[in-house]
Image (tube, rainbow, N blue to C red):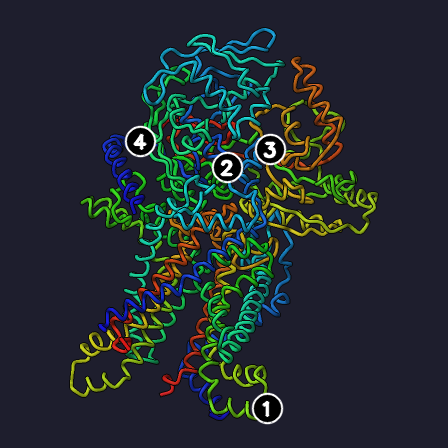
């Protein structure tokens, strides 16, 4: 059992090093988050990374740039339209939009104390577009595809070149995947099979971010310690919390108990019913943000009968019990994406926004008859086990309501892995899911979720007019013309009904009354860097 | 031949005989996991931007692009070299995960078993001393009551009452207070490790974390233990040597607690062995409810994520433990029972 | 023992064991409620009424309403039918298959017996609840698969039991006599041996009925239970348990009580049966 012995030895060594510090922080200087999920890798680029891993990497790694945030209700919300330098000292976009030049901070250091160099930045940028990981497909949405686009100008300057002026190039560098890595350390652990050190960085970090990793136990907890040399904040200050514990507590009811007792500081994944009661009781702070970069929908497989028939899709869209679902399944905690009044063109080009769908069983029955199904038909409605809390009621209500126009629904609740497979293989007739986009940009939504033969085109929809419009919008620099194209995208979708839009669920962050600074981020996780305790 | 040698030989034979069963378990689990109607590659590639290529990459990384018999052959070879593969969910080698998590499950199961035996044996003895009496019926009723509540309900109720309402129990999240430092690991049992380190606060913390989940589990297994104690005591109390002892005028206490109980202990031991291995595998819901970082919760998460390797590793581990516990019971039985002897 | 003697003994045991008698009466009541229950309530267990969601018990809804405004009592009653059906079907399946396979092995012995023994060993070495989970996940979480999974994990016990009981009796004089009078082995096992083993197995059957209900509840808790909107105790309890902290106790109370009472009855009944069959109790 030499493996075990070695393992025990390492544990003991870590504990010996860690324990004197552990006592140094008071409870007040420690933030404890409880979540139903877990960080499964320290490198967010790894296939299979959980959302918690994405969020954790924001605290451990810096990116060249970061989105700003703006006040929103009791907390903050990320500002997709404004970026600021993070690890970079400054950046400059050339007038033709084809070159972005980053100046580095002369005083920035990695967690091991060595200075951040242009060499490291070039290596990190190469890594995110080249390594076999989640990075390349994301970066390509911002026209970042090859390492030849990144050049070192001098030890403190790196340049990014683009083929076209892509509005999403810079925002992509602020996303989760574009981490800046200490290339000396990473290279030392790279192998011929794994030149980008994906394996090593899974369990180890080599960043410059606000926090270092003190303890990483997937499935149990991840503990962070503040890096005293961090330079990436807006005003050069250090985060308030010296230590952060993110702990996995699978039972949502237990998480609610922990907050109610004041033993945990924050949770962002409580059940709606618990949040409702907590809000009523008024002892904890609930920061509720509709996830404006997400939408929950019922998708119809437009490739198979009978959903290839527009009238059938319209009939089902008219038969869904929107208000009841909104009230009973998510307890009204979100923003409605149904019930709008417009008919021909939406008031703005923003997406997602409420669509002109209403529950109208008479019209639904009429449409169904016109479609050639006066007696209805048999179909199925599928969702994943992990979403059962919300979708059990949704499914019951849909089955009941569609039953009234003669559509007989077979409800299928399947494990998440199976659900993903069935969606990718386009085997489902009708199902529900929540789509999330990091880029809150209308053309990006439509390109990602309504075009192409890929998983995220839930409805397997293929509409040439929509495809052309979305591509035109992508490279349209004029905001006025962009707005026209965006409205057109929304109008086509409303008319063709590939999906019925339900709502944007709220992200409910429940925190102790003394905790401040919570921001709703595009990655929907907690960024500890701006948080504090009164 | 001496008795211990005979027992050892018996143990060796039993161990060898269990190998085919273990192989069967491995193959069956392997096939069962492949029948699961989800594609793990698709699941793990489900980042916001993963496409077909990422799916292919993961499939290759997990070895799923080969035929099932080939995959099985590779898996068996890996087991032979002491590897159980990698978990996609935690990103760690399965063996390392199991090694870290097994002590948590064992600690909890031991605590629950000790607690259950501590309650069940006195109750069973009490019932056997007065068969048919109100005590007898009350014991039976109480024990049966424990089996009737699903563990996830009793667990959540205990948390609600003792943590949320009364505030007596520590927060039900894992093995030790999250703010306390963990003792250096010797046995993997946090209570014992803390005591070794002389850290009595940590030991108390670890022990108090154990109480609620252990009670939840113990309630569920009281019935078979108490029932067996009662039956076995009844049988012994009716046997000749007890009659003789009575006739010789030995005190009642001495007869019951020294002679009868010792002889009645063997069948209880057998049941306890079975209960132990069953509990270890059936911990799933208790571990989930109490955020206990054990092996069963680990396997459940993996199963729902179609993460093959951890489930296979877990089942194999449970089967091995099952075999060893049975063996241990047999050996103890052999050592204690004069009839099992060298032929 | 004569038939009347057996009845007399049964009555004696029932009298002596009031708990078992009470359990028997309660079990009959519960089953009757499941069968005729839908007539007792005016509510449709599937009909939602969101305007009246999550209401505590009152004169209209004796057990309150759930998240969708459905009557909890109507759902508990409807769920009873399904749960009893699942339990009965699963136990019946494992009993029949187990008795036939085990009986044949016990009677014939030899290579088949050894091979079946090996397979039983494999099944016994599995962590059973995890096996049930994996089976349901693999086959799909539909009622028939929950039944199948529950039956499979019970199967080894029945095979072993039937095998042991038949093996003990196969040398008995009356079996030899039956054989001598020209009965085939199949007929001997099914016609003579199994009926003699049945009483002993009834204890196991009763205990397993309760256990099967708990098993279905556990599967529901982890999301592998029956599909909504089908009412089932396990899924109602699992959902309701999560509402305890926010004070909606009635969501778990009614289904929890129904589930508990049912399992309690089957267990106490099993115990009672054991006493009835156990000669030691007769002294």
The Cα atoms of the two marked residues, 4 and 3, are separated by 44 Å
Residue B331 vs B80, above or below: the answer is below
Tell me if residue C222 can be seen: yes
Return the residue at label 4: A28
Could you confirm whether marks 2 and 4 are on the same chain? Answer: yes
Tell me the element at label 4. helix
Note whether C110 is above or below C74 in the view shown: below
Which mark identifies residue C182? 1
Dot 2 surroundings within 10 Å: few (below 14), some, or many (20 or more)? many
Spot occupied by residue B32 in the image (x, y as percentages of width and height): 53, 54
Q: Which mark is residue B39?
A: none
Q: Which mark is residue A48?
A: 2
Residue at image coords 28%, 41% = A6
Give residue A419's position: percent from left, percent from top: 59, 44
Query: Disc 2 to disc 1, how far (Cα)?
Result: 67 Å
Q: Label 4 lies in what chain? A: A
**In the displayed structure, does residue B98 sit left or right of residue C71?**
left
Q: Nearer the viewer, residue A22 or A281?
A: A22
Q: Is mark 3 on a helix, strand or loop?
A: loop
Q: Do the residues labelled 2 and 3 touch (CB within 8 Å)?
A: no
């Amino acid at each position: 059992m030499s493996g075990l012995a070695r393992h025990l030895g390492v544990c003991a060594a870590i504990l010996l090093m860690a324990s004197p510090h552990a006592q140094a922080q008071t409870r007040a200087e420690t933030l404890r988050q409880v979540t139903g999920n877990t960080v499964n890798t320290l490198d967010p680029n790894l296939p299979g990374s959980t959302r918690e891993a994405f969020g954790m990497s924001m605290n451990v790694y810096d990116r060249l740039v970061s989105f700003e945030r703006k006040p929103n209700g009791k907390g903050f919300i990320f500002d997709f339209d404004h970026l600021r330098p993070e690890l970079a000292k400054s950046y400059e976009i050339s007038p033709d939009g084809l070159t972005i030049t980053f100046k580095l901070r002369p005083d920035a250091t990695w967690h091991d104390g060595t200075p951040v160099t242009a060499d490291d930045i070039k290596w990190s940028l190469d890594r995110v577009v080249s390594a076999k990981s989640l990075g390349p497909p994301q970066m390509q949405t911002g026209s970042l595809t090859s390492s030849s686009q990144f050049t070192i100008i001098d030890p403190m300057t790196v340049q990014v070149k683009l083929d076209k002026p892509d509005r999403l190039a810079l925002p992509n560098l602020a996303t989760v995947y574009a981490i800046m890595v200490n290339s000396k350390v990473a290279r030392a652990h790279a192998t011929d099979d794994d030149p980008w050190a994906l394996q090593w960085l899974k369990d180890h970090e080599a960043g410059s971010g606000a926090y270092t990793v003190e303890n990483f136990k997937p499935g149990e907890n991840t503990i962070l310690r503040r890096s005293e040399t961090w330079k990436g904040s807006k005003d050069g200050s250090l985060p308030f919390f010296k230590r952060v514990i993110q702990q996995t507590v699978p039972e949502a009811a237990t998480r609610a108990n922990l907050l109610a007792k004041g033993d945990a500081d924050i949770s962002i994944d409580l059940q709606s019913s618990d949040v409702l009661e907590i809000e009523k009781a008024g002892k904890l702070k609930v920061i509720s943000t509709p996830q404006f970069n997400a939408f929950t929908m019922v998708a119809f497989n437009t490739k198979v009968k009978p959903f290839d028939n527009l009238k059938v899709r319209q009939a089902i869209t008219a038969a869904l019990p929107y208000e009841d679902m909104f009230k009973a399944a998510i307890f009204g905690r979100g923003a409605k994406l149904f019930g709008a009044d417009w008919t021909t063109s939406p008031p703005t080009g923003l997406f997602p926004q409420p669509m002109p769908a209403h529950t109208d069983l008479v019209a639904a029955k009429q449409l169904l008859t016109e479609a050639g199904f006066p007696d209805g038909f048999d179909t199925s409605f599928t969702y994943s086990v992990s979403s059962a809390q919300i979708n059990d009621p949704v499914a019951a209500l849909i089955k009941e309501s569609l039953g009234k126009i003669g559509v007989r629904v077979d409800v299928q609740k399947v494990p998440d892995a199976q659900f993903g497979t069935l969606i990718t293989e386009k085997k489902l007739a009708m199902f529900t899911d929540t789509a999330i986009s990091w880029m809150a940009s209308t053309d990006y939504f439509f390109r990602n979720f309504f075009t192409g033969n890929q998983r995220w085109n839930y409805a397997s929809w293929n509409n040439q007019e929509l495809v052309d419009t979305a591509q035109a919008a992508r490279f349209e620099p004029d905001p006025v013309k962009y707005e026209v194209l965006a409205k057109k995208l929304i109008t086509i979708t409303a008319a063709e009904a590939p999906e019925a839009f339900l709502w944007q669920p709220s992200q409910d962050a429940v925190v102790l009354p003394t905790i401040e600074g919570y921001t709703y981020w595009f990655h929907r996780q907690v960024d500890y860097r701006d948080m504090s305790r009164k | 031949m001496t008795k211990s040698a005979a027992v050892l030989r018996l143990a060796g034979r039993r161990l060898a005989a269990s190998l085919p069963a273990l192989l069967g378990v491995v193959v069956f689990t392997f096939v069962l996991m492949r029948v699961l109607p989800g594609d793990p590659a698709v699941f793990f590639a489900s980042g916001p931007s993963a496409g077909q290529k990422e799916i292919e990459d993961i499939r290759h990384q997990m070895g799923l692009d080969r035929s099932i018999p080939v995959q099985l052959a590779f898996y068996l070879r890996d087991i032979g070299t002491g590897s159980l593969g990698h978990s996609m969910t935690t990103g760690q080698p399965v063996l390392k995960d199991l090694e870290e998590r097994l002590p948590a499950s064992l600690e909890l199961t031991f605590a629950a078993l000790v607690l259950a035996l501590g309650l069940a044996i006195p109750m069973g003895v009490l019932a056997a001393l007065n068969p048919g009496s109100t005590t007898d019926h009350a014991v039976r009723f109480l024990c049966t009551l424990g089996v009737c509540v699903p563990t996830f309900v009793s667990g959540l109720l205990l948390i609600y009452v003792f943590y949320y309402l009364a505030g007596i129990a520590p927060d039900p999240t894992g093995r030790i207070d999250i703010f306390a430092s963990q003792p250096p690991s010797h046995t993997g049992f946090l209570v014992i490790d803390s005591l070794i380190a002389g850290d009595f606060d940590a030991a108390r913390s670890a022990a108090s974390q154990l109480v609620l989940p252990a009670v939840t589990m113990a309630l569920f297994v009281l019935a078979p233990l108490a029932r067996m104690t009662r039956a076995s005591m009844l049988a012994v109390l009716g046997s000749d040597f007890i009659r003789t002892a009575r006739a010789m005028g030995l005190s009642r206490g001495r007869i019951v607690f020294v002679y009868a109980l010792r002889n009645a202990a063997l069948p209880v031991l057998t049941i306890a062995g079975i209960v132990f291995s069953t509990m270890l595998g059936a911990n799933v819901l208790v571990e989930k409810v109490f955020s206990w970082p054990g092996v069963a919760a680990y396997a459940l998460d993996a199963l729902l994520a179609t993460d093959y390797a951890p489930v296979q590793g877990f089942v194999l581990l449970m089967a091995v433990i099952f075999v060893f516990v049975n063996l241990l019971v047999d050996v103890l039985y052999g050592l204690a029972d004069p009839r099992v002897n060298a032929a | 023992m004569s038939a009347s003697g057996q009845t007399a003994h049964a009555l004696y045991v029932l009298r002596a064991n009031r708990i078992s008698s009470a359990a028997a009466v309660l079990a009959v009541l519960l089953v009757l409620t499941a069968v005729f229950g839908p007539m007792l309530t005016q509510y449709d267990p599937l009909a939602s009424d969101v305007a009246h969601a999550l209401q505590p018990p009152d004169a209209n809804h004796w057990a309150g309403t759930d998240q969708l405004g459905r009557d909890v009592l109507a759902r508990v009653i409807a769920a009873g039918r399904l749960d009893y059906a699942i339990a009965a079907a699963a136990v019946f399946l494992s009993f029949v298959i187990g008795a036939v396979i085990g009986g044949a092995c016990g009677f014939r012995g030899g290579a088949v017996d050894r091979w079946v023994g090996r397979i039983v060993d494999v099944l016994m070495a599995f962590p059973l609840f995890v096996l049930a989970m994996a089976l349901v996940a693999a086959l799909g979480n539909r009622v028939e698969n929950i039944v199948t999974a529950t039956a499979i994990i019970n199967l080894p016990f029945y095979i072993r039991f039937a095998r042991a009981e038949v093996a003990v009796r196969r040398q008995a004089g009356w079996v030899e006599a039956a054989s001598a009078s020209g009965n085939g082995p199949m007929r001997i096992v099914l016609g003579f041996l199994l009926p003699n083993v049945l009483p002993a197995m009834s204890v196991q059957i009763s205990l397993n009925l309760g256990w099967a209900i708990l098993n279905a509840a556990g599967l529901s808790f982890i999301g592998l239970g029956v599909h909504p909107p089908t009412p089932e105790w396990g899924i109602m309890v699992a959902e309701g348990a999560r509402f305890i902290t926010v004070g909606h106790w009635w969501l778990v109370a009614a289904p929890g009580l129904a589930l508990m009472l049912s399992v309690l009855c089957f267990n106490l009944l099993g115990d009672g049966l054991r006493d009835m069959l156990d000669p030691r109790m007769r002294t």
